[in-house]
Amino acid sequence: MVSEEKETILWEVFIQPKNGLSHRHCGSIHAPDREMAILSARNVYSRRGEGQSIWVVRSIDIVSSDPDEKEETFSSDDKIYRHPTFYDVPDDVGHM
Amino acid sequence: MKSNMADMVFEGLLRIADDNLILGHRTSEWCGHAPTLEEDLALPNIALDLIGHAQTLYCLACEINSRYKNEDQLAFLRLEHEYKNLLLVEQENGDFGNTVLRLFYFSTFMKYFWERVKIECCFTKLKEFSEKAFLETSYHSRYASQWVVTLGDGTDESNLKMSNAIANLEPFLGELFNNDDFTEMCSQNDFLPEPTSIFDSWKNEVKAILQKGNLDFPDIILKKRGGRKGEHSEAFGYLLSDLQYMQRAYPNSSW
Amino acid sequence: MARKQNEKIVSLEEFQEKIDRDEKIEPKDSMPEAYRKTLIRQIGQHAHSEVVGMLPEGNWITRAPTLRRKLSLLAKVQDEAGHGLYLYCAAETLGKSRMEMNQELLSGKAKYSSIFNYPTPTWADIGAIGWLVDGAAIMNQIPLCRCSYGPYARAMIRICKEESFHQRQGYEIMLTLARGTKAQKEMAQRALNRWWWPSVMMFGPSDADSPNTENSVKWKIKRYTNDELRQKFVDAIVPQAEKIGLTVPDKDLKWDKKRNNGQGGYAYGEINWDEFWRVVRGDGPMNNERISAKQKAWNEGSWVRAAAHAHALKKQTALQAAE
């Protein structure tokens, strides 16, 4: 009886702890449709009142970079001119 | 508070508290036995809210009636005829469909009930509590309505099971909307709304949800009643023997 | 997140170097098949234990003696469902679906912690489980927050945070009973007698008989061996029992200065490994009842899940027609 059942859809859950912060990935759940997904996400991931906004997205809809191309994709951080300390400003100018 | 007013408030609080405790008890029976792991979290969430409501209300009741020293004495140590809950909430769970349908009926009723208490209750502490209770019961109603639509609309089998659940619960709905001398007194004193005054809002919402689930709205006439007067069904005795077991077997102990 | 099989084969040496640098492994990174299998087995057993673990305690929700106890027990058992769910999701990132996991549990193929095959005949068992079983679990779990596999470590961080109240809840129950009437104190002592040895066994076979430990430690899936954790557990629990006037049921228990590299620790009696293996192999007091309860819930829920699928499909079709 078990084996005949279809897998339910896997959803990734993102919770925004409060206004002004971004939604953060906190885990996944199974649900057959988006309405149930939102309900379940709330029941599972905000049992202690965490968060005030929830996103759910189907796991298969997430496009991910290839880990084997990590080095090409994320070239090393050698562009030192992108960092503030690259630039000399006299001390008496104060914080800038 | 004058003594007849105090009696009224005490009795009114007990009615609501008992409904919540007993439905919370039934809902908690699902913990570990639900159709999916996600529902194993959802149902206890709701049971926690319901039992939590009962706890707050029993505490308020104890402040009014010095015969009871704490909320546990009210929850665990009354005799069966002293519980004033509706027959609807004490019935066995039945299947998952029957469980969510009952929850939908009850929480939708309570949502409108608390909404009215929020506006017009003369008892300040209850009025304050109603803000939170309203939000929580609104969520229960939304959760349960989604399942009622899903199961009603799902498959032929699930539609049939939901139709059976509607028939099964139908005799108990009349009591939910039954005005009696007591509810009239509560309403005249701006304490609690009369059940009949909630009927139209409840009916519109329930009808719309059942329709979305291809289900027929039941006839609501007063059939089975007695809970409010302490006359309970057989199922209630078994429930109490679970609920009260520890307090009865080990009297006068701290836990 | 669902895993896309990564074709690139990583050499064991390369992988070990990564682990030794304390780098985390993420779902789409290449990993040795044995690492993946070990994790699936361990996370799966852990998840099943949470889910089966709901039953012996859930048993007492409707009978809890006060509203306060009822609410905290209900919240605790619900947390266990949540923890099972987080762990199944972590296993899913390794390519093992929830449905497969569930099937293995229901068919009896999968293992879960044997401790949940013991019965909870009294309220004091709820105290003993919280105190001892959750106490043992926390010792196992805290090091797992630093496990090399990212999704498992993240799930464990969440779990440990949420479980922080579980052991205190159990100890408080035991403390109240121990300070209560004679009948209550006896109930507490009997529960401690029942749960002590199964709790000590919870850490698994001793290191000499634990074939998986070596790889697990090397790969930073486990950070301590079974015996190390067991020693920590005994050292922590014995004074807690003394504090509330309960007696640990081990006549060989005594302070041993040589333990813990000379810092001292408790020497404890011989563990009954026959019993351990008997329960693992399915012959414990409640093995059948636990699995039957899960099978019953699953089978009775099948129409609900089928309806939810059908309803979702109808909505999707209607949505497509509208577009």
Image (cartoon, coloured by chain):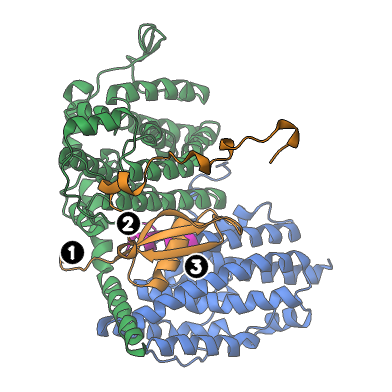
Chain colours: A orange, B blue, C green
For the residue carrying disc 3, how many other residues have a C-alpha within 10 Å: few (<14), some (14-19), or many (20+)?
A: many
Residues tagged by mark 3 and mark 1 found on one chain of the structure: no
What residue sits right under mark 2 in the picture?
Answer: A64
What residue sits right under mark 1 in the picture?
Answer: A2
For the residue carrying disc 2, how many other residues have a C-alpha within 10 Å: few (<14), some (14-19), or many (20+)?
A: few
The answer to whether the residues at label 2 and label 1 have Cβ atoms under 8 Å apart is no
Is residue B156 shown above or below B61? below
The stretch of residues the image draws in magenta is B31-46
User: Where does the C terminus of chain B fall, quadrant-wise?
Assistant: top right
For the residue carrying disc 1, how many other residues have a C-alpha within 10 Å: few (<14), some (14-19), or many (20+)?
A: some
| Pair 2/1: label in front | 2
Ranked by sequence position, the earlier of labels 2 and 1 is 1
Task: Residue type at mark 3: give it.
Answer: Leu
What percent of the width, then of the height, locates residue C215? 20, 29
State left or right for residue C244 relative to residue B153: right
Q: Chain of mark 2?
A: A
What residue sits right under mark 3 in the picture?
Answer: B23
What percent of the width, then of the height, locates residue A28? 37, 57
Is residue C163 shown above or below B27? above
Q: Helix or strand or loop: what does disc 3 sit on?
A: helix
Residues tagged by mark 2 and mark 3 found on one chain of the structure: no
What percent of the width, then of the height, locates residue C112? 25, 43
Cα distance in 3D space between marks 2 and 3: 46 Å
Cα distance in 3D space between marks 2 and 1: 32 Å
Q: Helix or strand or loop: what does disc 2 sit on?
A: loop
Residues tagged by mark 2 and mark 1 found on one chain of the structure: yes
The answer to whether the residues at label 2 and label 3 have Cβ atoms under 8 Å apart is no
Q: Is residue C6 magenta?
A: no
Task: Please indicate, yes or no, whether residue A17 appears anywhere in the rendered image.
Answer: yes
